[in-house]
Amino acid sequence: MEVITRPVGEGANIDRLAERIFHESIRILGGLKKLVEYRNLTWLPSLAEAAYVIALKNDAVKTNREIAEYLGITEQTVRNILSADERKVEEYLRGGGEHPEHIAGAIAKLAYRAIKTEGDDV
Amino acid sequence: MKHEAYVYELGELRERAPKIFGIPTGTKLDEMFYTVVYDEREGKYVKKPLGGIPHLAVMNITGIPDTGKSILAEQFAVYQAARNYPVLFITVESPAHFLYTALKQKAHALGLDFETVEENIIVIDASQDAELRENMGALLDTIAYAIRRKNTKNVVIDSVTGLYEHREVLARQIVRQIFNFLKKWSQTALLVSQKRSSQSSETAEAAGGLAVAHIVDGTIVMDKTVITTRWEERLYGRKMGEVIRTIRIDGCRLVPHASETYVFEITDTGLIDIKRPLSEVVGGD
């Protein structure tokens, strides 16, 4: 009888998942070079933070309070990230619409969905 | 995936609709789920025992401590494994080496070949690893790995409550994720969930509480009563201090089922032996 005693696979590592969300977010935004060219490098810390929030919420199934404590941010920031409107942000990035709230949150959510759809065996 | 992908014409689902048949548990529970077939000779629809829990059902087994939930889950695992249907057993409470002993005892008591059982069971020991219990992503990835590795058809989680202890607010979300995951991987599953003794067996909480019962395909409630009054002695035909154990199916959305409460015993060899409806027992054995 085979016994598995340790986690197996990518979901086992929230850090690795957050990194993947972060990288996918940069890809969605057109790549790192584009961020440099458009002087948008200041987005990166917010993207990193949002990537962790999305990973912890969806894969580790943590509460908003747990996430806030884990990352050292406020619960309101966690809520803002989780409630960011992906459609509005997509529209804004295509050049239309008003500047939406929490772009990083929406991008991280899009990135997470893309990762899960792409390697959708989990 | 675009949301449109989740919209179907009813006819498009014909090929994807699962066939309804029973996955035996090795107990009389197999006769408590029915299917309804048309009898041409009789010219009417008749009930036929399904022969097990419905194929691809995700069932919840719930009850207070010492009602036989784990025994039923283990008996199911051993019975399926002996029939060469691989089983993934996720132990959240009992360490894997204790589970091994329990499964071995069950196999011997049932007269099953333990070598075959051993070959067909893969275990995830979440009892010793907090990450497996508290990081749903880690657990689901590990389950996916085990399902692929052994090509399992059945999954047992004992207990799913252990995955949300101290954060019950997340119970529904966690059970929903597990339910969807097991459906996606086409597994027939038993999820053991623990009921507090303060939740009486006829209430919705008896089905696991926290809306767990609304998510899964059906619930099996196991209960016990210790005979402590003369009235109960007469009612159940049992002696003072004896225990009367009951089992009932508290809803199943996939197939019809017995609506009576049945009396069962845990045998000396540690097996579930379902006897007859409680209504037949009441008033003298």
Image (cartoon, helix red, strand yellow):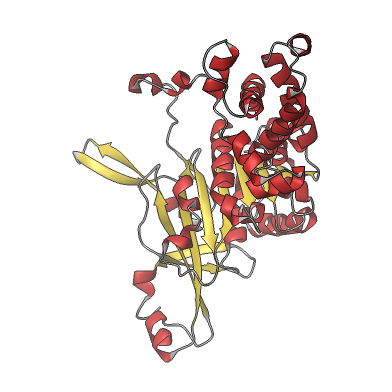
Q: Residue furthest left?
A: B43
Q: Position of residue A58 (x, y in %)?
A: 64, 37
Relative height, residue A85 to residue B52 (above, below): above
Q: Nearest the camera: B190 or B150?
A: B190
Q: Residue at x 58, y 64 (%)?
A: B68
Q: Quadrant of the N terminus of chain B?
A: top right
User: In the displayed structure, does residue A59 sit left or right of residue B218?
Assistant: right
User: In the displayed structure, does residue B20 sit left or right of residue A40?
Assistant: left
User: In the displayed structure, does residue B213 sit left or right of residue B185?
Assistant: left
Q: Quadrant of the C terminus of chain B?
A: bottom left
Q: Residue at x 77, y 28 (%)?
A: A45
User: In the displayed structure, does residue B151 sit left or right of residue B41?
Assistant: right
Q: Residue at x 68, y 45 (%)?
A: A74
Q: Position of residue A40 (x, y in %)?
A: 74, 17
Relative height, residue B241 to residue B178 (above, below): below
Q: Residue at x 52, y 21 (%)?
A: A87
Q: Position of residue B16 (x, y in %)?
A: 45, 24
Q: Nearest the camera: A2 or A76?
A: A76
Q: Nearest the camera: B167 or B184?
A: B167
Q: Position of residue B29 (x, y in %)?
A: 47, 55
Residue A57, picture quadrant: top right
Relative height, residue B283 to residue B66 (above, below): below
Relative height, residue B164 to residue B253 (above, below): below
Q: Residue furthest bottom?
A: B230
Q: Nearest the camera: A103 or B202?
A: A103
Residue B2 at least partly seen: yes
* Tally of marks: 0
Residue B191 at least partly seen: no
